Amino acid sequence: MESITYGHVAPDFVDQVEMMSHANLSRCFHCLACSAGCPFCEDMDYLPNVIIRMVQFGMKEAVLKSSTIWLCVGCNTCSMECPNSVDMAAVMDSLRQIAVGEGIQIAETGIYSFHNAVVDSISRYGRTHKLEIMMRYKICEKEFFTDIDLGLKMLSKRKLDLLPSRVKDKKAIKSLFEMAEGK
Amino acid sequence: MRSMKKELSYFPGCSLATTAKENNASLKLFLNYFDIRLTDIQDWNCCGSSSTHSVNSKLALSLAARNLFLAPQDKPLLIACPGCFLRLGQARQELNGSQEKQKEYEKHFAKTYNPNLKLLHFFELLVQMNNNGLFKNLTGRLNGLKIAPYYGCMLARPPSMNKEKNHYGLIEKTMDSLGGESVQWPFLSSCCGTFLSVSRPEIAEKLVNRIMQGAIQSGAECIVTACAMCHLNLEIRCRPENRLPIFHFSEILSLALEGKASKGWFKRHLIDPEPILQQRQLIPCQTS
């Protein structure tokens, strides 16, 4: 857990986050219910409610460079705990998307590579092909020797299909990706 | 045998179609037994999964929307994966809340959007089946098997969906009515770590082993999962000293239909469930 140094501020950051996430951050009264419920908080650099406060203070760079926004898996446990219905998972989605959009140096490059490998698989097959996602991720992160035993065991149990299950209408999937890119 | 004749359309999702084929097969067998027939949505695509909405909201909505537009409009759409159910449910909520988005996607897919398409979670279907008395002849079939019911994060939703149906307690209720014995334990809705299992395995391992130890301490003989992703994570990240067989909910339900469950499903498990099945005399048939 790091202490917070109040440095460069971006006063419009909170508006940007609220507009993207449709969450009202002023409703947070820092009861810590979200942070207490979060299964990942031990490994985060800032607790989820601290991220909210930092957004309100305009500490854009520190928030977008944090590990916290990438360690959040969107399990919604925080949303269930929050007495004021702040959609924390949506806030985290928005923060990740702003970080990617603005080319910020990402703290958790492995997690970002994984997301890219999944999206890449969907763009090619319309579905996720787990074996290929794992291989691409390992190549990207140069983690060639971890989980080899596990991979072989999963292959022997036929848990990992060699060939992808795929959507027939490739054009339809391509058009969805073009739509998302604003083409 | 009582039955409940029904035709449903079905969204399997990537996990059930690939890594968790045994989940898919047992679900179909169980429903088929009661005359509930499923037809996969033709040419369905991935719901978007956790990764898409993490990096691109528009793409997440578009991927889920294609499935909503492809689903036959006259039948409820059954979804067994809690992740897919949430993704499609959120997309539908977003479309229902915006005429502009509806029009955009109607134009894109050249089809009319149906805001009333019923998304049916497998758990909700089970409630209907139970209310129709379908499980009355199956009492006692699980021979006292001690089960830790595990929902993972499927009980959690964003605040905008907090008025939707909650399925808390359904695994316990169903297992007990079939002759199983559900234990009380603290980790039933604790997240399994999902994709961190790949990119930060040490974090997933910590969460998984906390869950597995919790189940062992509660006196359970096995864990029953509602989600195929959880099933995989518990199996692959569990340390040898914390191993306990893990069943998909649909497998356990099928075991209550005597002689119908397939041995082939259990051969795909990484933690061998055969010893506990033999001990409790829950015998699957030999064919796969």
Image (spheres, coloured by chain):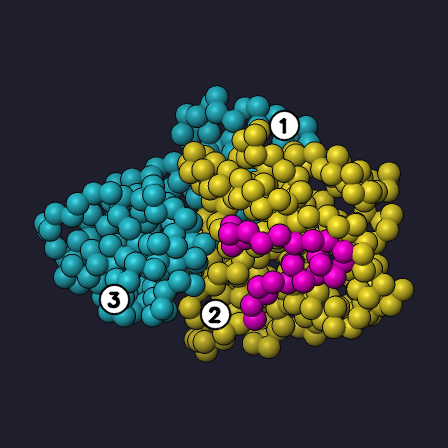
Chain colours: A cyan, B yellow
Residue at position x 38%, y 46% from top? A40
Q: Is residue A126 above or below residue B233?
A: below
Q: Is residue B30 visible?
A: no
Q: Nearer the viewer, mark 3 or mark 2?
A: 3
Residue found at the very far left of the displayed protein: A7
Assess disc 1: are there few (<14), some (14-19) or many (≥20) residues with their C-alpha within 10 Å of its C-alpha. some
Judge the density around disc 3: few (<14), some (14-19), many (≥20) Cα neighbours within 10 Å.
few
Residue annotated with mark 1: A153
Label 1 or label 3, whichever comes before in sequence order: 3
Q: Is B170 one of the magenta-colored residues?
A: yes
Mark identifier at residue B161 = 2
Disc 1 from disc 3: Cα separation = 48 Å
What residue type is disc 3 on? Answer: Phe
Q: Quadrant of residue A125?
A: top right
Magenta residues span B165-189
In reply to whether residue B260 is colored magenta, the answer given is: no
For badge 1, the amino acid type reads Lys
